[in-house]
Image: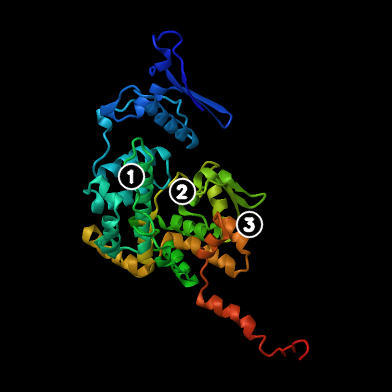
Amino acid sequence: MAILRRCRGSCSHPKRCLEHLWFDVMHGGTRYRVAANEFAIPRMPADRQRPIETMEEARAWERRFIGEIEAGRDPRRPRRARSNTDAAPTTVSAFLDAYMERCVKPAGLRSLPSVQSRVVVLKRYLGDLPLDALEEPDDINGFKADSDYAEQVEIATVHRALELLRGAMNWGMAQTPPLFRKSPFHRFGVRMNKKLETSRDRRLTRDEEKQLLDTALQRMNVGEHRFAGPLLHDRIIGALELVCRRGEMLLIQNRRVNWETCQIGIPGETTKDKENRRVPFNPEGRLAAILQRRGTLGPDAFVFGAEEGSYQPNIQTAWETLKLLAYGYDPKPGRTGADWNREQLQRIDLRWHDLRHEGACRLLADGVDIRIIQLMLGHASIQQTQRYLNVTDEELRRGLEVSWSQQGRPLRLAAGG
């Protein structure tokens, strides 16, 4: 690594020239060479941009030049000079808006609506604070423990919002110049104790499943509900049989169904972990009948899409209506009705993701190896799969009956007894 002068005879004092300094660094088999001022000036604050004035300053910029290379960025790439409109945000609300526009949206995350909802919560409770207030844990701990939001939701939901804030602050500290001097997320500041999170163990009984399916085919197969019942019926079966995430399942097209191997291909661009999966299905089961019927719509049609085969990204409203009807509640219209409906849904306490849990638990109860279940779920580790699997009281009793039935077997004496 070196700082070179490339005056080429144009300077009267070439040994003291600071105008024609160049950074020249070899890293990982690649040579990075750029004029020092071309690198430094765009990275200076908008109101203090000027050429490098001393060799000490040049060496400081050289260290930043090397730091960008080691961080995986190409310092030769020209940067837009900062203007007065690029002023650093001064409030938490403005900072979160900048984080969304400059980091989250360009990343193309599939979970963008979830991120946006958490940003709304953080802006509501912390948005009016000055930006440097986030460097101390007091206000964040107040939001975590004393806000009405923390009283309304589970601690796991609060943790998801704080994880977003932590990621945003890490992004802020990586900016040039940094927006934060330090992070409040450490053992003596803001802590997120995952052990306090309650593991969800909601199981769907066979009677509940039948109740949902019957309601979908009967009470929701009318014009009042836009004949959405049969489609929901198929999607519930698909969720239980394929143990896919909702977004993955809704994007399955007929051309992904391989009848020779009885597998459904789930491409990586639609999955959470970006890994391709192939999920087998029973050619004689109830899912096969759905696949055959939907296959007549053509190879590009979506198996769990609309009636004509088009993609249907949102089924939440129909799902909530089905739950209310299946459990004996008539949905009420209007704003006051929405509050009442929400209360009943909280009593029912059944989420679409519970169908994925239930399908995996049934595979375990049927004796399927946990490694196979992990592959079907698309989990990165066995530990993650184990957190998914919940054993019902009846399954626990049947498992212990094996031990109880052996009580009459004579005990073997220990050697030497």
Instruction: Read off the residue under disc 1.
Output: 181
Q: Is 275 on the left-hand or right-hand side of 184?
A: right
Which numbered circle lies on residue 305? 2
Q: Residues within 10 Å of mark 1 (few under 14, many from 20)?
A: few
Q: Amino acid at mark 2?
A: Gly
Q: Residue at x 64, y 52 (%)?
A: 262
Q: Residue at x 38, y 45 (%)?
A: 170
Q: Secondary structure at mark 1?
A: loop
Q: CA distance from mark 3 to mark 1?
A: 60 Å
Viewer can see residue 400: yes
Q: Amino acid at mark 1?
A: Arg
Residue 137, by quadrant, is bottom left
Instruction: Read off the residue under disc 3.
Output: 283
Could you tell me which quadrant the C terminus lies in?
bottom right
Residue 30: x and y in percent read 56, 27
Q: Is 51 on the left-hand or right-hand side of 229?
A: left
Residue 22: x and y in percent read 45, 21
